[in-house]
Every structure is written in C-alpha cells, then in structure tokens.
Image (cartoon, grey):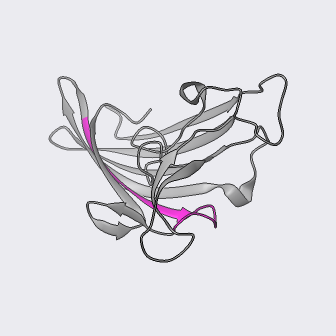
Amino acid sequence: GDHLGLHGRLSLGAIIPLPYDERNPTSRVPVTYRFYAGGPNSNRGYAYRGLGPRQCIRESAVGQNLCQTFAPTGGLALWEASLELHVRLPFDLGAVLFVDLGDVSERWQWPTWPRTHLTGGFGLRYDTLLGPLRLDIGVRAIGDPREPTKAVTFLGELPLMLSLMIGEAF
C-alpha cells in the first residue's frame, strides 16, 4: 500500500447577526451557536475550545487584573487550516507530522495574520478495528499577544498539548 500521504483541511465560517451591534457583536448570537476552536480535532496545540475569545470567571487572589480561570465565549468568525504528512510504518503503526493554524474572532472580520495561532507537532498512529488510535503532541508557536504564553496541562505549564483519541484528526 501507500507508505506516504499528505492530507489537508481548511475551514471557514462567519455568522453575521442582523442588525449588527458593533459595540457588542455576539449579544444576538446564543453561546451554543458561536464558533469555537482548539483541541484534538482542531488546533492541537490548544485545549478543547481553548483558542479564541474568552472571559474571566475567577480572579486571581494575588495581584490586580490577573485572571485565574477563563471560560470560552465563542466568536462570529472562524478560519482553520491543517496539513499532515502521514508515514506508514510496520506492524500497523504510522507517524504523522502536522501544522495547524487559525483563529476565532469575536467580531465578524476577515482573517488577519497577526492573530494567527500556529501549532506544529507530531503523532503516532496504531490501526485498530475501530479506527486509528492516535497520540498527538502539539506545540504552540505563535499566538495572540494578549494570551498567556503558557498553557496549564497535566504536563505542567508548557506551550503544548498531548491528546489520545480514536479516529483521524480530520
């Protein structure tokens, strides 16, 4: 069979509520209808729904203007792109190199490069009857300068995410 494959994915989306309120653009769109990004089937350097607009739900006890816990609020515009290089290995194994990038914006707008969230990473695949068991490690490279530079994961405060899933990323 084929030992090498290149796979790609592109997602674009926009919600334009009418009438559009520039001061509070998401007010007319329920939270469950908004766009979210991040996670094992999106941008693999971020937690599930961890990329994009969010609000503080718990202030830090130390220092002013520090937030301890954020909640995603979703946005009205989304763009994502992914590219994967798959290599078949012996014993039903595979290896993957990937690049994920994209953004979710609170306002309806065209994608802008300065807000691009870029993740690079690698993964392993093992073919099972249910589909490939995949282990991916995504490392964030570029992000919104207003975001914290570290993600709190079970690996500590590192700009990476580890995910274990069944099925392909896209």
Q: Confirm whether residue 52 shows in the render.
A: no
Residue 115 locus on image (x, y percent): 68, 56
Residue 6 locus on image (x, y percent): 48, 41
Give the residue drawn at x 82%, y 22%: 18
Give the residue drawn at x 18%, y 44%: 90
In the rendered view, tell whether residue 143 sits above or below residue 16.
below
Residue 35 locus on image (x, y percent): 59, 33
Q: Residue 155's quadrant in the figure?
A: bottom left
Q: Residue 126's quadrant in the figure?
A: top left
Q: Confirm whether residue 122 shows in the render.
A: yes
Q: In which quarter of the image is the N terminus?
A: top left
**Image: magenta residue range:** 133-148
User: Count of labels shown?
Assistant: 0
Horizontal side of residue 107 vs 50, given as left or right: right
Q: Residue 107's quadrant in the figure?
A: top right
Give the residue drawn at x 64%, y 38%: 75
Q: Observer-nearest residue: 23 or 48?
A: 23
Q: Quadrant of the C terminus?
A: top left
Residue 135 locus on image (x, y percent): 27, 47
Give the residue drawn at x 59%, y 25%: 33
